[in-house]
Amino acid sequence: MKSQRHRWGIGSVVSTVSIIVLGWTCNSAPGQLPQKFFWRASPPLIEPQPVNQDHVYAFKDPSVVFYEGRWHLFCTVRGRQRSHGIAYFNFPDWDKAGQARPVMLPNHDGFFCAPQVFYFRPHQRWYLICQAADKNWTPNYGPAFATSPRLDDPPSWSRLTPLQVTKPAAAHGWLDFWVICDEQYAYLFFTSLDGKMWRSRTPLAQFPQGWSPPVLALQGDIFEASHTYKILGQNLYLTIIEAQNGPGWRYYKAYIADKLDGPWRPLADSKEHNFASMNNVVQSKRWTDSISHGELLRAGVDERLEIDPKQLRFVFQGVLDRDRQGLPYGQIPWKIGLLELTDPPR
């Protein structure tokens, strides 16, 4: 496998990373997570545009990997004709993202959204995890998966199959499903819109089936869109979770743990000290009043979901409060942008 050097810019910000396809090498020792977070926001990089002659209200819920010299981004599409679908983009650099044309995934005819994409090494296949509904399923809504041998070929994805996880009786709802693996298990995390994050797991040999009954993993002033990562070179995990009505309508909190079955302890979990919000994000021209459903850019593509704390970048959905006022949630004009860690203000 060949090492590649990739250079990308947002405005005047230019960064360099080193990757190995389906793996990762780092040019220096592992870094530490910051104790406080400060971010610089790009302009909006992906904005609503028609897809298959459907009026699109929003692109949202991004999941992204860098593979074979290109960024591959999957996201939810909210449209007039189709309320929930998943679109695929690819582009060489983030400053070219706005020129990429979306392609709808054709592997499910009904409701599916909130994608997560990763390469599962034991099966040597790409996996798409999402929430989906089908009248032929029992129950007819829940977590689902599809696989593909080719990340960049939308028709190659298999039809969606339910993950066969049982919804907890105590959960208000369940959504935003997320898979991460250690050396023994695949873990499935999700949130329930009531201050709870849940966890299920299955042995790697049984993935993507064989899930245990979900248990409560974390409880607090949290809402949805929990995403969990392993810190590169360390036995440490980071979970970021969207919260509501803080510094901005939506913002992100962060928790850490020494293993995937917890316990999770606060890293940046308050309105005053948080992961990403209107208090610690600088915009050259204000285009969002929310930091909502986002994903950290990973240091690789596989099921370990490793991130380099020295190169934290966060792709997210945003919108101005004035642009969403009076609209049904499905018509909010979410756009996709990117945060890059920066120095604290002086």
Image: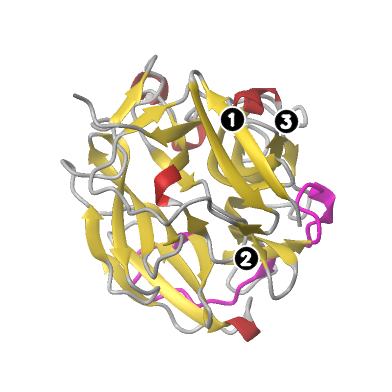
Q: Nearer the viewer, residue 177 or 332?
A: 177
Judged left or right of residue 1, residue 304 is: left
Provide the secondary structure element on which disc 3 rests. Answer: loop
Q: Residue at x 72, y 30 (%)?
A: 51
Disc 3 versus disc 1: distance between alpha carbons?
A: 27 Å
Residue at the far left: name it.
272
- Residue 234 point in image, percent of width and height: 40, 66
Magenta stretch: give its range: 149-176
Q: Position of residue 277 (x, y in %)?
A: 29, 36
Task: Name the quadrant containing residue 1.
Answer: bottom right
Q: Which residue is mark 2?
A: 144
Upstream in the sequence, badge 3 or badge 2?
3
Amino acid under disc 3: Val
Chief secondary structure of the magenta portion? loop
Q: Quadrant of residue 267?
A: bottom left
Instruction: Identify the amino acid type marked 2.
Output: Ala
x, y percent for residue 187:
49, 73
Q: Which mark is residue 27?
A: none
Which residue is disc 3 drawn over? 51
Q: Which residue is mark 1?
A: 8
